[in-house]
Image: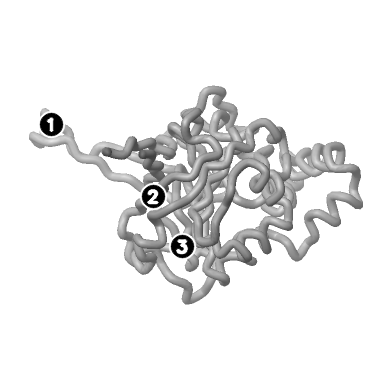
Amino acid sequence: MAKKIYDLSQNLGTDTQFWPFYPPFEAKYFKRKPEHGVNAQYIQTSNHIGTHLDAPRHFVTGGATIEQIPLTKLYGPGVIVDLRDEMDDLALYTPEMIEKRVKVKEGDILVLNTGWHRYAPDGEEPDEERYILLHPGPHPDMVQWLLDKKIFLWCVDAVSTDHPMNLPIGRFLGKGTFGQCEKVRKLCEEKLGGKEAVDKLFPVEHYQLTHNALFPNDCIHAENLGGEIDAPELQNKRLTIGCFPWKFQGGEAAFCRMVAFLD
């Protein structure tokens, strides 16, 4: 029986929201058919925009680059976990939330559906400030759980696998100007029980925690998933998942197509 294919990727174009401090996606025609007999485009961009895969090299000097990651590690059994009913602005997801919904086996490809893709530029409720500044993120317990489960690839439908408080967003974005970091921190303190609680959950040394703690330990991720990720038949199911980046020699990250295959 043929497998049904689901595209879990966001669109990529000039309207795609880019990571703070990074250059945007730019595209232009440099040849047009009336003049040259052909249409041809030129693009200029950072890697960390749209649905993309981070290679170990992104955070590990001398780490593997995109073309060095075997496709056998990017295609195989996995799960899509529907966390939407517990996610809101600046929420934390935990191993317990995942395990009460679906069985995760060692070595699975793990996809988390937080619902945040709906605020992406191509989502149902586009809101770029909410998408970037207020997305959910992992509780610190996720790090050891991912390592214990021997997860090589995990994926989220948000701009980062890290919580905003472990990113520039909650630490220094707009400091002295628009003050986004102060606004995000204030919301976190209101949500999570005050300054002490926030300081305990997000200590200084946990800056970009899932990147710094996991990449050296053979656990990488893809970010900005979307597309058909909400399909009811995919939720909390075991299925086959594939991540297909372009074969970027020396790439610390690469655009990718995330795909689910269902029998």
| Viewer-nearest residue: 135 or 154 | 154
Is residue 9 depicted above or below 143 in this figure? above
- Residue 65, image x and y in percent? 41, 67
Between the C-alphas of marks 2 and 3, the distance is 15 Å
Residue type at mark 1 is: Lys
Element type at marker 1? helix
Q: Which residue is mark 2?
A: 242
- Residue 141, image x and y in percent? 73, 57
Q: Return the disc, 2 or 3, that comes first in the chain's sequence.
A: 3
The image's colour scheme reads one colour
- Residue 108, image x and y in percent? 50, 56
Residue type at mark 3 is: Ala
Q: Residue at x 47, y 31 (%)?
A: 233
Q: Which residue is mark 3?
A: 55
Q: Return the disc, 1 or 3, that comes first in the chain's sequence.
A: 1
Can residue 168 be seen here? no
Q: Return the disc, 1 or 2, that comes first in the chain's sequence.
A: 1
Question: Residue lying farthest front?
Answer: 1
**Left or right of 238, for residue 127:** right
Q: Nearer the viewer, mark 2 or mark 3?
A: 2
The local crowd at label 2, few if under 14, some if 14 to 19, many if 20 or more residues have their Cα within 10 Å, is: many
Q: Residue at x 52, y 42 (%)?
A: 80
Residue type at mark 2 is: Gly
Q: Which residue is mark 1?
A: 33
Is residue 106 depicted above or below 103 in this figure? below
Between the C-alphas of marks 1 and 3, the distance is 38 Å
Q: Residue at x 44, y 52 (%)?
A: 77
Marks 2 and 3 close (CB-CB < 8 Å): no
